[in-house]
Image (cartoon, grey):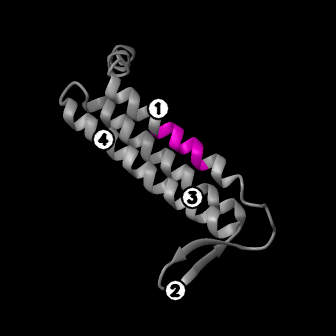
């Protein structure tokens, strides 16, 4: 039963476009974050325009961003999958929202890389 639902779900070109774009943005985040040098010193993890750098931490904590992005993708993809046959529009909204969140996370990872290089 689940294979049939997944088969029809993944034949939709709009869904495939959003899924591929979301996963490629997550991959770009990972590639971008591997550019940050690995040091034992704390690195800036958050920048605020009012206060400047306001959060320092270990370099390993930068990978929380792609992890959260992937979790958002998985949750939205699962919800879109289960709601696809009930209402395609809501399914498209979940996939589009996932893409929008991935773009925000990508901008965040680009900012962290820019601060640390």
Asked if marks 2 and 1 touch (Cβ < 8 Å), the reply is no
- The residue that label 1 is drawn on is 20
Q: Position of residue 107 (x, y in %)?
A: 50, 58
| Circle 1 Cα neighbour tier, 10 Å, few/some/many (<14 / 14–19 / ≥20) | few
| Among the two numbered marks 2 and 3 on one chain, the one whose residue lies closer to the N terminus | 2
Quadrant placement of the N terminus: top left
Nearer the viewer's eye, disc 4 or disc 1? 1
Q: Is 115 drawn above or below residue 83 in the view shown?
A: below
Q: Residue at x 40, y 42 (%)?
A: 75
Res. 52 image quadrant: bottom right
Residue 77 in picture, x, y percent from top left:
38, 36
Q: Compare residues 15 and 9 and report the one nearer the observer.
A: 15
User: Marks 3 and 2: in contact by CB < 8 Å?
Assistant: no
Q: CA distance from mark 2 to mark 3?
A: 19 Å
Read off the magenta span.
22-29
The disc placed on residue 94 is: 4
Judge the density around disc 2: few (<14), some (14-19), many (≥20) Cα neighbours within 10 Å.
Answer: few
Instruction: Kindly report the distance in space between the C-alpha atoms of the residues bearing marks 2 and 1.
Output: 37 Å
Q: Are marks 4 and 1 in contact (CB under 8 Å)?
A: no
- Say which residue appears at 44% left-offset and 56% top-offset: 104
Residue identified by numbered label 2: 51
Question: Residue 94, image x and y in percent?
Answer: 30, 41
Q: Does residue 111 appear left or right of residue 97 in this picture?
A: right
Query: How many other residues sit within 10 Å of disc 4, few (<14), some (14-19) or many (≥20)?
Result: many
Helix or strand or loop: what does disc 1 sit on? helix
State the residue position of label 3.
109
- Earlier in the chain: of badge 3 and badge 4, it is 4
Residue visible at 45% across and 49% down in the picture: 102
């Amino acid at each position: 039963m689940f294979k049939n639902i997944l088969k029809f779900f993944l034949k939709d070109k709009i869904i495939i476009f959003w899924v591929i774009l979301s996963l490629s943005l997550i991959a770009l985040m990972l590639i971008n974050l591997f550019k940050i040098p690995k040091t034992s010193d704390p690195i800036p993890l958050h920048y605020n325009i009012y206060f400047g750098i306001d959060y320092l931490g270990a370099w390993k904590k930068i990978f929380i961003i792609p992890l959260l992005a992937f979790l958002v993708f998985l949750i939205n993809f699962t919800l879109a999958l289960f709601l696809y046959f009930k209402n395609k529009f809501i399914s498209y909204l979940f996939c589009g929202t996932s893409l929008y969140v991935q773009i925000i996370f990508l901008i965040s990872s680009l900012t962290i890389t820019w601060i640390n290089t």
